[in-house]
Image (tube, coloured by chain):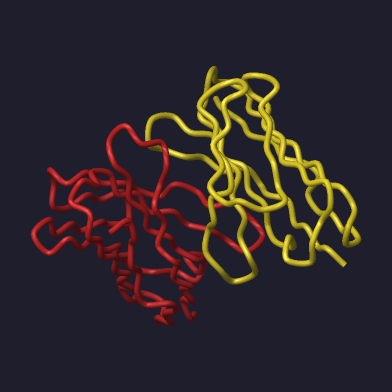
Chain colours: A yellow, B red
Amino acid sequence: SQTIHQWPATLVQPVGSPLSLECTVEGTSNPNLYWYRQAAGRGLQLLFYSVGIGQISSEVPQNLSASRPQDRQFILSSKKLLLSDSGFYLCAWGFWREQYFGPGTRLTVT
Amino acid sequence: QQQVKQSPQSLIVQKGGIPIINCAYENTAFDYFPWYQQFPGKGPALLIAIRPDVSEKKEGRFTISFNKSAKQFSLHIMDSQPGDSATYFCAASIYSNYQLIWGAGTKLIIKP
C-alpha cells in the first residue's frame, strides 16, 4: 500500500530564515505530487505540483520554491520566510484525479 | 468559471440527523467530483467521489447526490455521529488535468 511522509510535523522559524520541508511517498511509482498551504480555519491553496522528476508547476508566485530531485521526493523551500508564510503545509500524491494527503507540517513564522 | 462554491460555511446538527453540504460549479467540463474529510491537525482524506454519468453514489453512511442540469452536487451523512465532526471539502476536476478545484470547506459539528 502507498504511504506518504512529511517532516517535520511542526516548525517554528524566525522571519528571514530559510525553510526546507520534505515529502516522500512509498509504494507507488511516478506519482503526481502536490504542495498545498492551509491558513488557520481556511481552505486549501495549491502552491506547486509536479508530474515527474524536475517538472514543477507553480500556482502562486511568491518566495517559495519546490523541487523534485527523485521520483518520490518533493521538497518545498524558501530562502527567506515571511510572517505570511505561516500555515499548515500539506503534501499530496496523486493517481489520475485522486489525491492522497500526508500528515502535514505546521509552520509558525515568528 | 473555475470556481466551486460550497455552502454552508459551518453546520451544527444533532446526533442522528442528516447534515447536507452543497456545492455548485459553472464549468461544464468538470467531470470528477470528490469529497474530502479533514479532522483538526490532519491532512484531508478522500471520502467519496462521483462522475456526472450517475445521479447518486453511496458509501456507507455517506451519499453524494449529483444534479447535472443544475450543476450542483451535495454530500449527505446518514445517522450522523459526533465522530463525523470535521471539515468537509468538495472539489472538481477536468479530464486530463491533474489539479483539483476546491470548495472553501464546511465545518460540521455533530452534537451528542
- x and y percentages locating residue B24 in the rendered image: 25, 65
Quarter containing the N terminus of chain A: top right
* Residue A41 vertical placement versus A6 (above, below): below
Residue at 17% in and 52% down: B56
Question: Which of the 4 image quadrants contains residue A68?
Answer: top right
Residue sitting at x 12%, y 64%: B70
Side (left or right) of A54 relative to A63: left
Of the pair A48 and A95, the residue shown nearer to us: A48
Q: Left of A90 or right of it: where is B100?
A: left
Q: Is residue B69 above or below residue A25?
A: below
Foreground of the two, A58 or B29: A58
Percent position of residue A2, x then y: 56, 27
Residue B31, position as x, y percentages in the image: 23, 43
Q: Quadrant of residue A27?
A: top right
Residue drawn at (17%, 46%), measured in percent from left and top? B52
Residue B87 location, x and y as percent?
A: 50, 66
Which quarter of the rendered picture does the C terminus of chain A lie within? bottom right
Residue at screen point 29% across, 41% down: B94
Q: Nearer the viewer, residue B79 or A49?
A: A49
**Which quadrant of the view contains residue B96?**
top left
Residue A26 or B92: which is nearer the viewer?
A: B92
Q: In this view, does B112 lie above or below B70?
A: below
Question: In this image, B57 relative to B18: left or right?
Answer: left
